[in-house]
Amino acid sequence: MRARRERWFEISDEGLVRRARERPLGRLLLEAVQNALDAGAANVAVELGPSELVVSDDASVGISDERLVYTVFLSDKVDDPTRRGRMGRGLKELLSTCERARVETTGATLVFDAEGRHVEPSVRAGGTRLVLGRATSDDERARAVELLRLTIPPRGVTLRVDGRVVRRPRPFLGLPSCELETVAVDGGVERATMRATSLAVYVPRKGEAPRLFEMGVPVQRWNVPWHVDVGQRIPLGDTRDQVPERFALAVKATLLEALLHRLDRRDLRGDWVNDVIARWPVTTTLLDAYVSRVFPKGSVLGATATDAPSLAHDDRARQLGAHIVEAASLSHGAYVALGRVLETSADFVARRGSELRGVEVEASETQRRFAEAVRWIAREIAGSRVRVRFYAAPPDPLGVLEEARTDVTSRIVTFNVEGRLRFDDVLDAHTLGIVLHELAHLVTPEHDHRFVDRLQFLAGLFARRLAEDPGLAALLRGC
């Protein structure tokens, strides 16, 4: 125990006023509301007039020690994480912003006016009533009412703001046991500690932006689609309107784990989900589940802009049936995280290259005539000389069947005899499309604008040659 010592410090009323005046009126009035809720009141009322503000409650007891009204940093809540206040400062800051004030509670009424602080007798049997003399503008009161009406009163508690009852929002989900950071006092020192608590998730009331709450008291707006109320003290800054980023991420991660299988693909692409994936150490199991719900089957990570040599792998991976998750669509943190459960396009191409080599087969007579027709089209339409080979390969585990491939360097076009190609009719629509597709790749292995332009040119030129030479179709079928 630290030895008791005489008073060392004084507090500047002007300094306290200056600091308190920086806080919005609604935020200051919430300090009084949370005190009433902590006292167990069943009814709390706030009235806002242009020159006077009144906050009253019907708690069974009032303020037990009058020093709690005027002694800064003195609090009777410091040892209980399930009570909202902890700094012994909120009520004093509210009073300091007023020109005059009366605090009517059990046993005494404290009066603050131009002459100082006075104590008068009180006839109240319970509860507390604050009468605050402070000039306010219409806009200031309107913003205060808006903030006060965000409060989520505990069940069985009625909160009225300017005579109107504050309705609780519609419940969406309850999480009864979540390990989250809280604030406790140990040996007279305020410390952060982990403690099991509950999270209550609500659908925002009409016109409300989603917010994070501390036991029903609104703290800050955030990018999660719901109101989320933490059932214990949460780490807060001096003005009680912001939590540390790490705490917000922890709550978001808890929500994502609980809601992953209830959210659709659009919801899972929300910024708040990306925050968790990119910046929180989520489990591999959660990442796997996230990927399976957000990205198509067969997704791989595309190359980054700084990895130019790997960009060609993206195009080849598409040819092999993969869906490319574009690196540019992801933050760096998300890209790194997804790399724990997704292949890169380069790794996919390397693996699939070995899987899809297939078995080279000897061409039949029909296939030799087909090869001759392909070489004619390559020479007369594409202006290139190619060699033609055949191989047999079944569909991959994803059901993708590669029907042909082109080696640009060796100028070899290889066709899969297990595919849907009509080797007896090179002019079959599907077959001719594959042939022209592969010949277009002789100018570029990628599916870029050059490839599209080349494919369009070859198709147009070939159609023109067929129209100009009626015997060409018979010639090619007879090759």
Image (cartoon, helix red, strand yellow):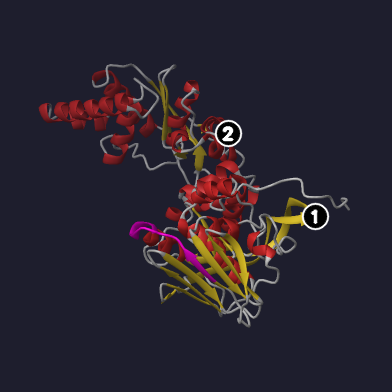
63 is within the stretch colored magenta: no
- 269 displayed left or right of 260: left
Residue that carries the numbered disc 1 in the rendered image: 186
Residue type at mark 1: give it.
Asp
The part of the chain drawn in magenta is: 130-140
Q: Which quadrant of the figure has residue 64?
A: bottom right
Q: In the picture, which quadrant includes the C terminus?
A: top left
Image position of 273 with respect to 125: above or below: above
Q: Which of marks 1 and 2 is in front?
A: 1
Where residue 38 appears, x then y in whole percent? 63, 70
Say if mark 1 contacts mark 2, CB within 8 Å: no
Q: Residue furthest front?
A: 115
Residue at 30% across / 27% down in the picture?
449
Drawn side of residue 463 relative to residue 333, left or right: left
Of 449 and 192, which appears nearest the observer? 192
Q: Which one is nearer the viewer's eye here, 409 or 278?
A: 278
Residue 414, x across and y down, in percent: 43, 28
**What's the distance in space between the residues labelled 1 and 2, CA to CA?**
57 Å
**374 left or right of 56?**
left
Residue at the spot x=73%, y=56% of the render? 184
According to the picture, the residue beneath numbered tag 2 turns out to be: 351
Asked if residue 95 can be seen in this view, the reply is: yes
Q: Is mark 1 on a helix, strand or loop?
A: strand
Query: Counting residues from the N terminus, which is met first, the one under dot 1 or under dot 2?
Result: 1
* Residue 342: percent from left, percent from top: 57, 40
* Magenta-drawn stretch contains 131: yes
Name the residue located 53 percent from the left edge and 45 percent from the top edge. 275
* Amino acid type at image mark 2: Arg
